[in-house]
Amino acid sequence: MPFKDSISKIAKSVEGSAKYVAKKSGDMVEITKLGREIASQEGKIKNLYYELGRLFYERYGGEKDFDKDISDICVQINEKYKIILGIKEKIASLKGMKICPRCGQELDIKIAYCPMCGTKQEMAEEVIGVQDRDVKVDENKELEKECEKDNASDESNEHGDG
C-alpha cells in the first residue's frame, strides 16, 4: 500500500501544482488585461491634455497677460506654423500652385478666388523677372536657414539642452 499512497501523494501534488499554474496563468492574463486598460486610459488622458492645450492655444494664444512659460510656448507654436506655411508655399510653388492665405488650400496659380473659403487671391505675374527670381531664391535660402536653426533648436530641447 505504501506504493499506492506514494502515487496518490504525487497525483495530489501534480494536481495541486496544475491548479496553481492554472491560477497563476489566469492571474497573468488578468494582469495583462488590466495593464492594457491602464495604458488605454493613460492614452485617453494624453489625448485630453492635447485637446486642452489645443483649445487653450486657439482661444488665448495671442494674449499677453499669461504666464511667461505659456506665452513662450505660444510664440514657439506660431513660429512653427510660419515655418510650415513657408514650406507649403515652397512646395506649391514648385508644383506651379499657390496656398490660400486664409484656409491653407492648395490652389492653381491662376485662380482668383479660393473655392473652399471664397478669399480673393493675389494673382501671380505671368512673367517673373530675373530680379524677382533672385528675391525668391533669397527667400528660399532664408527659409532653409530658419528650418535648420529650428531643427537644431528642437534637437537641443530633446536632449535637455534648452
Image (cartoon, helix red, strand yellow):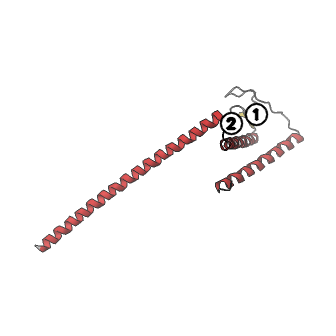
* Total tally of numbered discs in the picture: 2
Crowding at dot 2, Cα within 10 Å, few <14 / some 14-19 / many 20+, comes out as few
- Reply above or below: 142 against 20: above
In the picture, the disc for residue 65 is 2
Q: Which residue is mark 1?
A: 109
Crowding at dot 1, Cα within 10 Å, few <14 / some 14-19 / many 20+, comes out as some
Ranked by sequence position, the earlier of labels 1 and 2 is 2
- Reply above or below: 95 against 1: above
Image quadrant assignment for residue 74: top right
Residue at the far left in the pictured view: 1
Query: Which secondary structure lies at badge 1?
Result: loop
- Reply above or below: 67 against 112: below
Residue 61 rendering spot, x and y as whole percentages: 67, 36
CA separation in Å, label 1 and label 2: 41 Å
Image quadrant assignment for residue 60: top right
Q: Toward the viewer: 53 or 43?
A: 53
Residue 65 rendering spot, x and y as whole percentages: 68, 36
Q: Toward the viewer: 160 or 114?
A: 160
Q: Residue at x 70, y 25 (%)?
A: 118
- The amino acid sitting under disc 1 is Ile
- The amino acid sitting under disc 2 is Asp
Residue 83 rendering spot, x and y as whole percentages: 72, 43
Image quadrant assignment for residue 116: top right
Residue at the far bottom in the pictured view: 2
64 on left or right of 43: right
Q: Toward the viewer: 42 or 136?
A: 42
Query: Which secondary structure lies at badge 2?
Result: loop
52 on left or right of 78: left
Q: Nearer the viewer, mark 1 or mark 2?
A: 2
Q: Residue at x 68, y 56 (%)?
A: 161
Residue 76 rendering spot, x and y as whole percentages: 69, 44
In the picture, the disc for residue 58 is none
